[in-house]
Amino acid sequence: MEKRVTFKGWLLPLLLVAPQVAVTAVFFFYPAGQAVWQSLFIPDPFGLKSQFVGLGNFEFLLGDPYYRASFVTTAIFSSLVTVVSMGVALVLAVLADRLIKGSGTYRTLLIWPYAVAPAVAGVLWLFMFNTRVGVVAWYLGQLGYDWNHVLNGGEAMGLVVVASAWGRISYNFLFFLAGLQAIPRSVIEAAAIDGARFWTRFWTIVFPLLSPTTFFLLVVNIVYAFFETFGVIHTITSGGPQQATTILVYKVFADGFVGQDLGSSAAQSVILLVVVGVLTVVQFRFIERRVHY
Amino acid sequence: MAGGAQSGMVERRGWSLWLTHAGLILGVMVIAFPIWLAFVASTVTQPEIVRPPMPVLPGDQFFENYRKALVAGVNAPVAKMLMNSAVMALGIALGKIAISLLSAFAIVYFRFPGRKAFFWLIFLTLMLPVEVRIVPTYEVVAGFGMLNSHAGLILPLIASATATFLFRQFFMTVPDELVEAARVDGARPMRFFLDILVPMSRTNIAALFVILFIYGWNQYLWPLLITTDPQMNTIVMGIKQMFPSGDDIADWPVIMATSILAMLPPVLVVIFMQKLFIRGLVESEK
Amino acid sequence: MATLTLTQVRKSFGATEVIHGVDIDVAEGEFIVIVGPSGCGKSTLLRMVAGLETVTAGEIAINGQRVNEREPMDRNIAMVFQNYALYPHMSVFDNMAYGLKIARMPKPEIAARVAEAARLLQLEPYLARRPRELSGGQRQRVAMGRAIVRQPAVFLFDEPLSNLDAKLRVQMRLEIKALQRKLGITSLYVTHDQVEAMTLADRMIVMNEGNAEQIGAPLEVYERPATLFAAQFIGSPSMNVLPGEGAEDGVVLENGMRIPLGRPVAGKVMLGIRPEHLVPDADGPLAIETGMSEPVGAQTLVHGRLTGSTAECVASLPGVHRESDLPAVQRYAVPPHAAHVFDAATGRRIGV
Ligand SMILES: Nc1ncnc2c1ncn2[C@@H]1O[C@H](COP(=O)(O)OP(=O)(O)OP(=O)(O)O)[C@@H](O)[C@H]1O
Ligand SMILES: [Mg+2]
């Protein structure tokens, strides 16, 4: 796509793109290049010189049980966040779509948690499950369940998943509702006349027609769980206990800033970069295909 | 088929309608519960909280707790942190919109050397969240002496081209005849940009502003890295700093008041600019 | 008031030439209409005059001054676009005033000029509205108003009426003509609608594939088309064209019919006869097998085929004729003054 009509001159447009070029070069391309470069070195213990190790950092990482564990943790974490937030959102969207009047009101009531920062969401959920003062933890205790996410890795994972999924429900709800409302009523009515009951209709007609939305949300939610949940993890568990909630992004931060292991942190960044790249390509491929439908 | 045929699932009369409402109300309540609890906690005293279970209805300490948070805070007054967040969110939103409008105008309305290359370079930036390149970016910002500064908070987060793509998309839909009419009227490029293109884009600008404001306000990792001075903390990252290290008991009422204050501006933006927000969300994901 | 001269103007997009050397001389205050089929280069020609496209070769002069290199605003022209190109976020007043503001005209004078244009175009009640709050005809008037307030040397119109419905088009056509007469501004007007061209033009230019086939007053073009293309493009229904061979007193058609024209003709030719010039005559030289007939009110269009050939013909007969009333084969006379002869190879008119 190109405009047929354009203005003459080349100096003005160069001036116009200059700010973006400058900001992007300094704060984006240079650091990204540095990340790749640093991933090939190991700094010596005094941080004065660094030694070229080629792909050594990567080799080390792939052999490192902690890093592998972090990969598994990330996979579990992001699958759970995606499934929980999309599942709840889909149920709510289907319910709201059944209403002729009032679906707008529910939308207003449901979308605002989107605006709550993941870090703040973390604090809210931490407060409910705090081992000393948390209301939910206390009621669980009354029921005979001794909640302690500070010591129990499974509970810690559950808590960060719920806290991360919570804020994301709004977003998924919005897109699911829009997707449902875009399905032509006549298609559903035709199925109803054919005698299909609600669930049959849902699984054989509505859900397949919703699949573009579902697929799109799947990718977007995985990206969210990978990168934007840092605040949740940092506020609730700081990656613990025993690294049970150390997802990849958290590990980049922990190794780079807390552990000061720049080479390893940079190599981890590069690996993440590849992961995002793949996800982006998947998404673009898919969107391209959807356009051609 | 009696009873109106425009609803999604066709049958929703009588008790089925009530069940639908019941399900939705339950959903709303479950989702709102953490925030309700936080609000209640921000209106009661510390002893009421540390002796569980805490009350479920608001207490009478609202003004006291919020005053304490805003004026004193824990490490820094929350009012100061709110200011920092506002500067950061506005800086990111306005800065990104400004540089994106300019460069989208250039790539759509001019043919200049390096245009294709520029296009692909900014395309690449779409793929990399700041989380992936934190360490080297930190070094760059430190090298410029921008740690603990507003510029350091803002600039690295402007370096992405989503907005440029959005504006490019929109500019492509502006009819060519409009440019020609402007040229016949004697408008030079910048005049056309300011008098015609920017005013025509105002809905898009507003929608994008809403999204970017929320994005900027809610940043966590980046401010955490580069603001070591509590006076420069943003509110979203400052909350975590209010928890004491070790075994001391956190000042929950103040922390919860701060949490409410931290979510208030973006939540208000979403609720009162719902149309623009939804539009921005949908467009920026295209 | 100004003259406009195009000398051997050419335009290429990349390697393809789309305008092949056009010469036009427009006198002061003249209304010139460029007419031709879609894609023939009308808009391109107009846009070169406006300064929106560069001129590949040749010269465009306004009032004798070469303007090839000037920006649109420095050419003293104004243009009305097909889709009006009104600024959607500005009021009607601001739309009209925009060019004057850029030219830094004093505010009171801008107000006076816009008020005058609004009065002429009956837009006074709408000055505060946005374009989307106007009907198609009103938008069209605003586009005209934007052109008028600048008091340009030349008006350029690119199919300004094609987005209007049929009735409004006739009305606006009359308004444009009246306005142009009143203001006396030299105008260049592009259309693909030959009725518009015939009714508006002082002189018209028939364009085909980047060439000006004929330049002349509408009736002159109608009565003495210079090329086969101009002959067929102007007039509705279109002129009948029958291939044939020259003879010493006229033309011999494919099927051997001899059409006397009272003058010698040579070589392979095309004989053109307008449908309304076919007169039923039992002794006429032209025999046509009658096909469908279409009553259109005052006339009846009788379709048919030349006997012993595949050439289709249409005759436009005054009054109402039913298919059943017409003989299976009707003979027609061809008045010599109404027969147009064109060279079959070049399409150029031969003789008078
Ligand atoms: N920017 C361009 N690049 C390449 N070819 C072009 C360009 N603009 C026009 N053309 C070609 O030039 C020829 C003339 O186009 P023009 O727009 O002048 O036609 P037109 O007579 O105005 O037709 P219409 O009645 O459909 O508006 C066409 O074949 C067109 O494809
Ligand atoms: Mg055209």
Image (cartoon, rainbow, N blue to C red):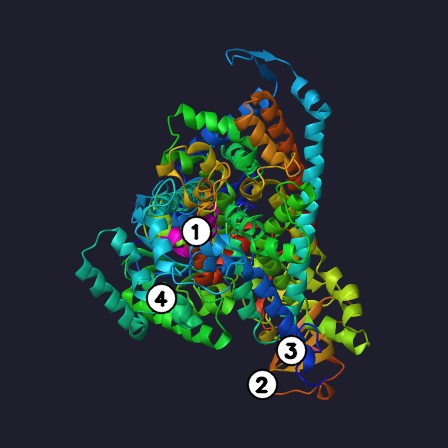
Q: How dense is the environment of label 4, judged by Cα within 10 Å: few (below 14), some, or many (20 and up)?
A: many
User: Which chain contains the residue that carries disc 1?
Assistant: B
- The mark closer to the camera, 1 or 3, is 3
What is the x, y in percent for residue B76? 36, 41
Label 2 amino acid? Gly
What is the x, y in percent for residue B226? 43, 32
Label 4 amino acid? Val
User: Which chain contains the residue that carries disc 4?
Assistant: C
Q: Secondary structure at mark 2?
A: loop
Residue corresponding to mark 4: C142
Label 1 amino acid? Phe
Q: Earlier in the sequence, mark 1 or mark 3?
A: 3
Residue B198 among magenta residues: yes
Marks 1 and 2 in Cβ contact (< 8 Å): no
Confirm whether circles 1 and 3 share one chain. yes
Q: Secondary structure at mark 3?
A: helix
Residue corresponding to mark 2: C297
The label shown at residue B209 is 1
Instruction: Name the quarter where the N terminus of chain B is drawn.
Output: bottom right
Label 3 amino acid? Trp
Q: Residue at x 60, y 49 (%)?
A: A164
What is the x, y in percent for residue B98? 39, 44
- In the image, the segment drawn in magenta is B196-215
Residue corresponding to mark 3: B18
- The mark closer to the camera, 4 or 1, is 1
- The mark closer to the camera, 1 or 2, is 1
The residue closer to the viewer here, C256 or C125, is: C125
The label shown at residue A87 is none
Marks 4 and 1 in Cβ contact (< 8 Å): no
Q: CA distance from mark 4 to mark 3?
A: 55 Å
